[in-house]
């Protein structure tokens, strides 16, 4: 649709369609795409790109059409419901709304800032977008000063102390910058203590609060900041361990030199979230903390496989797969960090992957997941540095075990083979089904044709391929024919795992999506698309 056309007079949340089998993309859909993954088009790419007015035309259409407050509410809704896969587009949209001449739009955008900016990094990103949109002119008016002040004052003292000591600066902004420019006036004593720490330093805090009888809240915040300061300067490993255990200090607050100590790591691991633990397994092994057959390895393996911890972390199986494949690789993406993968840890990660599948909530849709084996799946996917056959196998396992009506197939030109994906199969056993099949030329329309000829009712076709050319038949046209025959508005998702660009999805059809590369965000984009969020 044309971005220059008048804004649609429909709710951004509930949209009506005239023809169930011919649903065209609306301005509201384009807006939600942008808020979800930073592009108004039907293509998600793992490569991040700069955000600007030029790629947010529908956002501007709604704002200029007098519907800025609706845009703000949509930003808020998508964020609170967990549909946003990257926070930057939402923060950019709020920054645009906050610049608008309409007072209600400006006020609404700044009012939700303290609710949507859950971390200092997000607050810094918002302020940076404001700066870029202003193009160097003054931006620190009363409204922004109040919004930034409200963000700091909305935190309790301890939460703010933890946040500012773990994330001190981002994208050229620091807490000291924001407090100075916003003319911050704390509304309670504990926030005031943290603000003094930021602007004046620990010595000034000691002089102001050290010898006084402070309230219980002030004592807690003071003690926490004192622990952070001691951790910065102490050379005593035993003291560092005590500080970590007594004040729940985290890895970001410990000097690199102390992270060479096995005992320090042991203290950190006690409260470390399982997702963070998985990301640090390589370093722990490289530094000989996780020695083969040790009690430390046994403890880590138990943590990794803890089903309760996996559910609490709400980590998708794909994220566990990434941790597993990175660990098995035996070296980091950058630098000289190398390690010999420990067998028990490798097995625990594989077990954690299988257990984490049960944490995925089903959508209730009918799926046909098709893996293109016409070319080798040995390539590495853009965005995740993982072998594409592992990605295809893992996603097939997730859909087969979480969605009651799922058919998995592999295919090449003129050949399609149904695959049996049972819950007792390992990732390697599933991947083998995609390696054994002979290759040939690709035809990404074949799974849809097969479903039509065999009268399979499918809500969502998902195709995983290493090819950028999808064969002689046009998958989009084949999908339309399938819709007419079946009477179902089926959707098509083509995942080009090594593609830098794809052009299969028709821009006007809201039931088609292209994915270039594959990463953890792609998993969430797929779910949003299946559930009609975007």
Image (cartoon, rainbow, N blue to C red):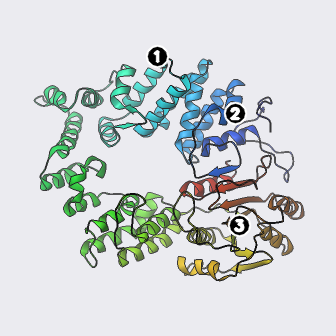
Q: Which residue is mark 3?
A: 367
Q: Earlier in the sequence, mark 3 or mark 1?
A: 1
Q: Secondary structure at mark 1?
A: helix
Q: Which residue is mark 1?
A: 142
Which picture quadrant has residue 178? Answer: top left
The answer to which of 493 and 337 lies nearer the viewer is 337
* Rendering coords of residue 530 (x, y %): 68, 56
Q: Residue furthest front?
A: 336
Q: Secondary structure at mark 3?
A: strand
Count neighbours of disc 3 (C-alpha within 10 A) and say few if under 14, some if 14 to 19, many if 20 or more. Answer: many
Q: Distance from label 2 to label 3 (Cα)? A: 33 Å
Eye-nearest disc, 2 or 3: 2
Q: Residue 57 shows which numbered tag?
A: 2
| Above or below for 220 versus 397 | above
Q: Distance from label 3 to label 1 (Cα)? A: 52 Å
Q: Residue at x 30, y 74 (%)?
A: 298
* Rendering coords of residue 366 (x, y %): 72, 66
Count neighbours of disc 2 (C-alpha within 10 A) and say few if under 14, some if 14 to 19, many if 20 or more. Answer: some
Q: Earlier in the sequence, mark 2 or mark 3?
A: 2
Horizontal side of 338 relative to 321 (left or right) equals left
Eye-nearest disc, 1 or 2: 2
* Rendering coords of residue 257 (x, y %): 21, 53
Horizontal side of 35 relative to 487 (left or right) equals left
Q: Residue furthest left?
A: 211
């Amino acid at each position: 649709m044309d971005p220059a056309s008048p804004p649609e007079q429909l709710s951004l949340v509930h949209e009506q369609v005239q023809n169930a089998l011919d649903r065209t993309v609306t301005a509201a859909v384009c807006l939600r795409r942008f808020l979800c993954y930073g592009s108004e088009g039907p293509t998600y790419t793992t490569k991040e790109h700069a955000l600007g007015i030029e790629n947010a035309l529908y956002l501007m259409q709604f704002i200029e059409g007098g519907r800025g407050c609706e845009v703000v509410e949509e930003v808020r809704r998508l964020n609170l419901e967990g549909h946003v896969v990257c926070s930057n587009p939402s923060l950019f949209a709020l920054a645009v709304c906050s610049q608008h001449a309409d007072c209600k739009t400006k006020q609404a955008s700044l009012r939700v800032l303290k609710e949507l900016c859950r971390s200092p990094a997000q607050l810094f990103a918002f302020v940076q977008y404001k700066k870029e949109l202003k193009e160097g002119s003054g931006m620190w008016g009363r409204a922004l000063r109040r919004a930034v002040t409200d963000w700091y004052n909305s935190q309790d003292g301890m939460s703010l102390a933890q946040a500012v000591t773990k994330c001190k600066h981002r994208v050229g902004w620091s807490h000291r910058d924001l407090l100075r420019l916003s003319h911050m006036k704390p509304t309670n004593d504990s926030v005031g203590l943290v603000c003094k720490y930021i602007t004046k330093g620990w010595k000034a805090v000691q002089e102001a609060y050290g010898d006084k009888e402070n309230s219980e809240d002030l004592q807690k915040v003071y003690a926490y900041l004192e622990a952070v300061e001691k951790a910065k300067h102490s050379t005593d490993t035993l003291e560092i361990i005590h500080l970590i255990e007594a004040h729940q200090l985290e890895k970001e607050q410990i000097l690199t030199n102390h992270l060479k100590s096995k005992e320090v790591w042991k203290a950190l691991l006690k409260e470390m979230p399982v997702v963070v633990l998985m990301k640090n397994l390589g370093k722990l092994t490289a530094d000989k903390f996780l020695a083969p057959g040790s009690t430390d390895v046994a403890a880590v393996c138990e943590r990794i496989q803890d089903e309760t911890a996996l559910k609490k972390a709400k980590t998708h199986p794909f994220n566990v797969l990434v941790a597993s494949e990175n660990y098995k690789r035996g070296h980091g993406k950058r630098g000289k960090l190398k390690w010999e993968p420990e067998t028990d840890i490798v097995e625990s990660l594989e077990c954690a992957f299988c257990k984490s599948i049960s944490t995925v909530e089903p959508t209730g849709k009918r799926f046909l997941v098709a893996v293109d084996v016409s070319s080798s799946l040995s390539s590495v996917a853009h965005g995740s540095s993982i072998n594409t056959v592992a990605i295809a196998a893992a996603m097939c396992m997730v859909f087969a075990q979480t969605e009651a009506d799922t058919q998995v197939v592999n295919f090449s030109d003129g050949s399609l083979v149904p695959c049996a994906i049972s819950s007792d199969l390992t990732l390697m056993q599933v991947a083998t089904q995609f390696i054994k099949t002979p290759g040939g030329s690709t035809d990404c329309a074949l799974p849809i044709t097969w479903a039509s000829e065999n009268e399979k009712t499918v809500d969502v076709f998902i195709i995983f391929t290493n090819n950028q050319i999808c064969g002689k038949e046009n998958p989009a046209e084949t999908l339309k024919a399938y819709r007419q025959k079946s009477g179902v508005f089926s959707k098509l998702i083509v995942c080009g795992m090594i593609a830098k660009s794809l052009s299969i999805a028709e821009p006007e059809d809201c039931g088609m999506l292209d994915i270039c590369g594959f990463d953890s965000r792609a998993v969430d984009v797929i779910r949003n698309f299946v559930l009609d969020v975007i």
